[in-house]
Image (spheres, coloured by chain):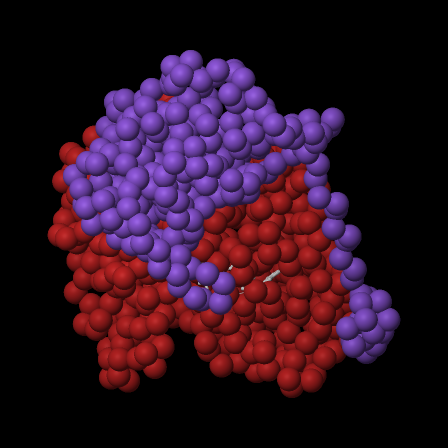
Chain colours: A red, B purple
Amino acid sequence: MLPQLITDPSVLGGLLTDASNLPGRADGLVRPRSAEDVADILRHCQSAGIPVLPTAGRTSTTGGATPDGGWLMSMAAFDAVGEIGHDRASAGAGVWLGAFQSAIEATGRFYPPDPTSRNECTLGASVACNASGARSFRYGATRRWVEGLRVVLPTGEILDVRRGDPIPADWPVPRWHEPAVKTAAGYAPPASLLDLFVGTEGTLGVITDVTVRLTDLPSDVIGLIAFFPDRASALAFVEQARDASRGDPRGALSPRCLEYFDRGCLGMAEGRTTVPDGAGAALFCEQEVEACGADAHLEAWLEALTAHGALVDDTILATDGPSRSRLLELRHAIPAGINERVVRNGMRKIGTDLAVPDAALPRMMDLYEASPVEHVLFGHIGDSHLHLNLLPSTPEEAQRAKDWYDQLAREAIALGGTVSAEHGIGKLKRDHLRWMVGEEVLASFRSLKRRLDPNGILGRGNVFEQGPL
Amino acid sequence: MKVGLCAKVTADTDARLKASADGSSFEVNGKVVVGPYDAFAVEEAIKTKEKFKCEVVSFTVGGGDDVVAQLRGTVLALGADKAVVVSDPALAGTDSLGVARTLAAAIKKEGCDVVFCGKQAIDDDNVQVPAMVAELLGWAQVSRIVELEIEGTDFKATRSMDGGVREVVAGSLPAVFTAERGLNTPRYPKLPAVIAAKKKPLETPDLAALGLSGGDVAAKAVTTAYGAPPERPKGRKLEGDVDTMVSELVRLLREEVKVL
Ligand SMILES: Cc1cc2nc3c(=O)[nH]c(=O)nc-3n(C[C@H](O)[C@H](O)[C@H](O)COP(=O)(O)OP(=O)(O)OC[C@H]3O[C@@H](n4cnc5c(N)ncnc54)[C@H](O)[C@@H]3O)c2cc1C
């Protein structure tokens, strides 16, 4: 039996857009409570040709959660945290990621993926979008941690998939070379059946339950903000820290995250903390305390920072809970400052999500800094993945910013990078994806999609162009 | 001028506390930190040091390796010149007055002119020690200050009272001040200072070295048991379609919670 279809405009009205602010429209909302409900809905919609879009925390920045007609499918009822063991933990797709992680950490275990939105986004969507975060420098994106999924295919078949399960021989899986950078763009060439449902932005199936792998909760973490006179010195330090960390992941200098903030960002943080005179860039870093002990880490960091000309006397350190939360507050003050500016300008900001091979990062940063409208640059520099935020203040500037973004995307592709390292394609970056993979690979995505979703009902408009396939 | 500051190392705010099965003690599962109100006292002590170009000594009663590490990483790294950690087996099980006697003796021995404390520790919330220290030393005492000016040996302290009223208190040193949120914004420790703090002096006198005996700190009041608060009843989830849930909710609010 189909769950009740809610068509009350006042209910639907709150679900028509996501963090992209794209306008959406929907004819109804269904609230399945079980995988069987999801299967019933999908079978019905498949035969009636009704588009269906799973909707969760709606923090998608790409319009992924913005419906373009048809039914919305709320994942909110899948809210049970299941068993948390030593090596594995399970939960419903609608569980808030941050709550799931807290429940795991209360048992002394650790699930690392940490998108900034983790308290507002769901576990299921973080898998669907292969989310990552600052700690991904050390721990990789969500994909690496997923062990099992319950997925309902767009035709209504329920699959319990475990890591290693093979892909049915008659499924036309895409074969292509993903760029060798952190990427969340397009259908990744799948190593196993499980991979097909991670990072395909919910276009191949609805995830109802997730099992993830756990690791040791670090005994302690040192947080640090280091200021540098300019970008070059910060980058030189990053290169050393990155190499050291890859050479010896448990060594004295082995950051778990390396986050960059340019001069413009520091301006936004002013008033919330004192930014030292002469600071042209900053890095926020975290070091998990390894067997060598906290003192050895501090010595190694001081030595490396000094060697690269950091303003060491101004390097801020947080070794305990309260001071670490103040550092995080400072880190979050920057996006908050940007958003304030955007609201004041009344224009939509454009945020990039490009990543390039490490060697190409300086070239990419040159381009970011040459942006023709006001901008700030920050992000996951350890993964050569920075978010350029263009802050236009007039419609003309908005157009210039959009053209510039297109140009940057082409440049990132030419440098061997990706058009999306973590936010996915959604509805906003379909052109960029096409430029990146080319028509032939895109056609291979489509044929897999057509095999699993003959009428193209699920997640219509995401990753590919509009309309039935 | 010499500035003293009392710093208690307590469980971090996100640490989990668990009473032992027999209720005689509790375990801390997590890190220890210098309490948040003590952090305001530390900042005020450092500001006073900067103004008067004088020495700052911190005082702590009881402590193991984690306490010492914490004091080095925060209090000494932020600018205190020396830490005094009184360690004596007789201090186990002492009460607020025993702690105050110990601190007062240590402060007297150092010869401080002004002492800063947090308004309370965040573990036992006793709010007793600073007033007792002032009394034992025969000094002035102003609690929960949000502003302080010291000129020569005179001070003017502002206290924040209920309803937002501000009370201004004037007096002269020596004095004990306890810090309320808003007194200042604690600075962050800087990396080179944290490393340099490892080499700052940290003394661990016993009671005898302060001229006290075990009898001086014997508890007059003894903690007899620790227990967890009663478990909160589980939330209830209403089932069914919207209409059923809404009428059930209204019924519950009316009949059980009695708010409608
Ligand atoms: C302030 C902010 C910070 C962010 N930071 C990061 C970051 O650091 N790293 C990062 O990777 N992303 C980040 N994001 C993007 C976003 O939070 C993530 O992509 C997140 O995983 C989306 O979760 P959600 O629950 O909000 O999903 P929604 O936005 O509701 O949905 C996202 C997509 O997943 C689909 N979907 C949802 N649930 C399911 C399901 N159960 N099965 C199948 N498909 C489903 C939806 O149809 C939609 O296409 C950020 C967003 C914001 C607004």
Q: Can residue A443 be seen at all in this image of the molecule?
A: no
Q: Residue B14 versus residue B187: which sits nearer the camera?
A: B187
Q: Residue at x 31, y 44 (%)?
A: B43
Point out residue B1 in the picture as x, y percentages from the top left corner: 21, 36
Asked which quadrant contains residue A85, the reply is top right
Lateral position of residue A457 relative to residue A142, left or right: right
Quadrant of the rendering where the N terminus of chain A is positioned? bottom right
Q: Residue at x 70, y 58 (%)?
A: A78
Point out residue A71 in the picture as x, y percentages from the top left corner: 65, 76
> Number of numbered discs present?
0
Above or below, B25 against A74 in this view is: above
Quadrant of the rendering where the C terminus of chain A is positioned? bottom right
Asked which quadrant contains residue B117, the reply is top left
Point out residue A266 in the picture as x, y percentages from the top left corner: 24, 58
Toward the front, the furthest residue is B138
Above or below, A430 against B201 in this view is: below
Q: Residue at x 59, y 25 (%)?
A: B219
Q: Can residue B221 be seen at all in this image of the molecule?
A: yes
Q: Residue at x 27, y 22 (%)?
A: B201
Q: Residue A178 versus residue A214: which sits nearer the camera?
A: A214
Above or below, A119 against A407 in this view is: above
Point out residue A338 in the picture as x, y percentages from the top left corner: 32, 67
Toward the top, the furthest residue is B208
